[in-house]
Image (cartoon, coloured by chain):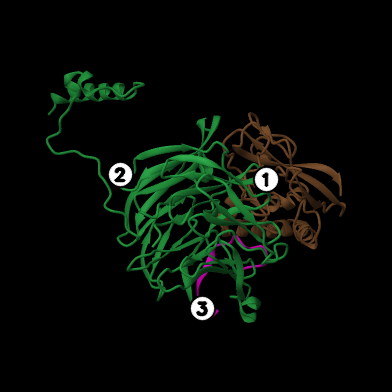
Chain colours: A green, B brown
Amino acid sequence: MRRSAPILATATALVLLASSAWAAQDIEALPEEARLVPEEAFTTRTLPPPAPSWIYVLDVAFDNLVASRVNIFDVLSGDFLGVLHSGYVPNVLPAPDRREVYVVETYWTHGTRGRREDLVTVFDARTLEVLAEIPLPRGRALIVSKQPVAQLSDDGRFLLSFNLSPATSVSLVDVQRRAYVGEIEAPGCSLVYPTGARSFSMLCPDGSLVDVAFAEDGSARVADNEPFFDAENDPVFEHAARDPDARLWYFISYDGTLYEVGYDENGRTALRESWSVVSAEDAAEGWRPGGWQLLARDPRSGRLYLLMHKGPKWSHKWPGEEVWVLDPAANRRIARLPLEEPAVSLLVTAGEEPLLAALSDTGLLTILDPASGEVQRRIEGAGVTPFLLDAFAP
Amino acid sequence: MFDRVVERLTRRVAQKSSRRSFLARLGTALAGGALLPLLPVDRSGRLKRAHAQAFAEQAQTQDDTACNYWRYCAMDGYLCTCCNGAVNACPPGSEPSPTSWVGSCINPDDGQTYLIAYRDCCGKGVCGRCPCLSTEGEMPVYRPQLSNDIDWCFGARSMVYHCTTAGLVGRA
């Protein structure tokens, strides 16, 4: 063994030299002693077919925003599955067919300097290799990552990426053809809430939605609506939950009013109803919604899960001490689930065994039974400064 | 002595509230500066007055590296004063965003209200020192001029956010 040490060292040095070369080198070009053949088989792993229990935890890496990452966990087993490295304040979009994951991101060619590049990176969901990079010629909104900054059309073919320059518009990307299609103008209105395969809505400063219907060539019709909430005094959070079967978006306001906004097959929206999830007694105790991705829907039961804390007005970014379970069909709260550690973001997985995931800003991912609130497992180190949870749609 | 007690109390409150939510601290990091002319400036409102007054109750005029320095009533971001910049200067190697976001802050020494221009320094990675956040009056992204989650380096040569300054405009 001692005799082989110098050979090993030489081999390592040669391999390092080879890998630092500009272009990949043919293995045959390496000296013979550098081509070590281990006795045991050696491979790169591939993930199994993606499951609804996979969660993509976006860590924006706040101390070094240009180098964010996406940690992937199976919350059913608690296993760490892999990582995607990503750029400045990205968005992560698992494709509905579970074959690909799209990351909408921004880089500068020399790290924090150089030429800015905005793109959609297409990852293979099982190999985690990059399949394509689609440039976004009109850039993208640079906002601390929030889900409605980029969304997919219901059929998964088009990616809709919000632009803020600070004029507002949406870039349309055909992920199937791997091509940027064009830009849809929506002056003054922001974010993306899909309402079908070829339609979405955006929130406007006056508390209204604009409804956008688009065609494959990027042409679009934009229709205005009356305000449905008081944007001046009690705005709705950006993060909302959706019931695609009932054609409904749920928006929650700073003071705890839940707005149920329906839409038709053409993507035209209308407020169906609104109710306060905070009773007079709750309000007297100071209970408010708060956090980041603070509202989630269980696709099986239809129940909503909302992060709540006790705090003064304008404490809307404080983490939730409890999860309130709401039955939107009956307009009532059905349970309060206290959390061991306050959480900033929530997600309910799809599939046969739905699980409630609660993310703390210290990187603890707590997995609970959505019915009982019982803790199933704790995943430590889900991120250093994690913000968002994404998963495959049902 | 009384002052010191008050200061200590204030600091404890500030520390507690910032520890309370890492997210809340972070939310400010990209905050900041620029308010472009095409966006409506929200100067109206009891919201801002109430905010300025609540902030002024615990504000001080001596230490501009503390989150409760009087000019920071609408501050969202890493303080450039902690990054070898100043309330009116960007740290070495960074560039001021050409436009700024205006807030109204009360100076507790004279009780007067002053206009403060918050301006981001851009073109370098995050400074990461002295994160300060006030979410009072903070609005979602669809009201961009009041949202602290947006990178406001618009108009600078680079959108990479470094820190935020707070320059004095004049009496409000």
Label ID, residue B32: 1
Tag 2 secondary structure: loop
Classify residue A227 by image quadrant. Answer: bottom right
Instruction: Determine the chain carrying the residue at label 2.
Output: A
The three-letter amino acid code for the residue at tag 2 is Thr
Identify the residue at image location x=36%, y=21%: A22
Label ID, residue B124: none
The three-letter amino acid code for the residue at tag 3 is Ala
Mark 1 and mark 3: span between their CA atoms?
41 Å
The three-letter amino acid code for the residue at tag 1 is Gly
Label 1 vs label 3, nearer the camera: 3
Mark 2 vs mark 1: tell me if same chain: no
Label ID, residue A329: 3
Mark 2 and mark 1: span between their CA atoms?
39 Å
Instruction: Determine the chain carrying the residue at label 3.
Output: A
Magenta stretch holds residue A331? yes
Mark 2 vs mark 3: tell me if same chain: yes
Q: Which residue is mark 2?
A: A127
* Other-residue count near label 1 (Cα within 10 Å), few / some / many at <14 / 14–19 / ≥20: many
For this view, does B11 lie left or right of residue A140? right
Q: How many marks?
A: 3
Range shown magenta: A310-333
